[in-house]
Image: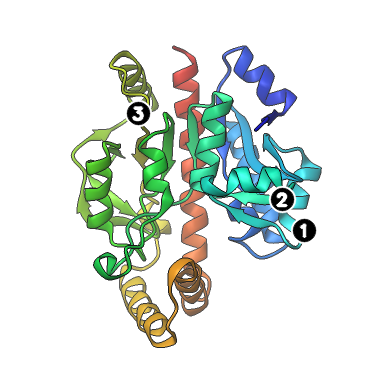
Amino acid sequence: MVLVVSEEVREALGSGRPVVALESTIIAHGLPRPRNLRVALELEEAVRGEGAVPATVAVLDGRPLIGLDKAQLERVANEDGIRKLGHRDLPLAVAARASGATTVSATARLAALAGIRVFATGGLGGVHREWTVTQDESADLGLLARTGITVVCAGVKSILDVPATLQRLETLGVAVAGYGTDRFPGFYLSDSGHPVDWTLHSPEEVAAVMRAQDALGAARSALIVANPVPEAEQLDPELHARVLDEALAACAQRGVTGQAVTPFLLDHLVRHTDGASLNANLAAVRGNVRLGARIATAWARG
């Protein structure tokens, strides 16, 4: 698999300048048109505003791209038939010359292959509710257990089993730290209701952990920096609890299973919160992208 790294990203990596990887699933599958393209451009500009270089990742015509130009962003945002690619799908997409937006696992995989150390996203996948029955667990977790990248996120999606996900990350040896908090964020919510063992307070502290990973030979697994959405921009917790309960009941009633569960629940939340869940999601992503750029800058300073 031959990576196609944009000239801007290649030059930044070669000169030791900060680079932040961004996923493309939010563009192709997470937002309606034309808002998706506006948000994609806004997130890249937020990275630049912090002095770093954005590297949005996608696969177009079988070519894994690290850093998209405007025309490529427009394709991901507007072209019908853009697939959703996890890391397991990458060889198939390359061989079939397919086009797809990358999820957390695929973005982390390709970014790490390109030599990018920092990746900013919204929320991670994790262990689904009723795991003992469904055995449904996101591929994100296993991939992060064997990929040396720092992931800035707002925790895991609140539709998941958060304590089981935290336990699974511990079992897999993936380091987790809250950023400015001793509570694990809940994606739409500042606090999932569960604690974290470690708290980091600055980009420099995060970069110090990354350097310690390298020194200890521990950089073969990810560092998760869990950055909560600001309380003023979170989804109202009571509304979240009520609508999520309704969504889970509707999911069970309609027999939705497998990969269809997450998009069903997230769509239900958007529709039944009048878009407030989407606004909280975007607030989290914006904050993570800015923090990711600051961490990448602290890392680049050595």
Q: Quadrant of the N terminus?
A: top right
Would you place residue 175 above or below residue 140 in this image? above
Marks 3 and 1: which is nearer the front? Answer: 1
Q: Which residue bears the numbered disc 3?
A: 202
Q: Is residue 12 left or right of residue 216?
A: right
Residue 267 screen position, x and y as percent = 51, 72
Q: Which residue bears the numbered disc 2?
A: 99
Q: Which residue bears the numbered disc 1?
A: 79
C-alpha separation, residue under disc 3 versus residue under disc 1: 39 Å
Residue 218 screen position, x and y as percent = 31, 23
Q: Quadrant of residue 65?
A: top right
Q: Amino acid at mark 1?
A: Glu
Q: Residue furthest bottom?
A: 253
Marks 2 and 1: which is nearer the front? Answer: 2
Q: Are marks 2 and 1 in contact (CB under 8 Å)?
A: yes
Would you place residue 227 above or below residue 50 in this image? below
The residue tagged with tag 3: helix, strand or loop? loop
Would you place residue 75 above or below residue 270 in this image? above
Q: Amino acid at mark 3?
A: Ser
Q: Nearer the viewer, residue 171 or 244?
A: 171
Q: Nearer the viewer, residue 179 or 118?
A: 118
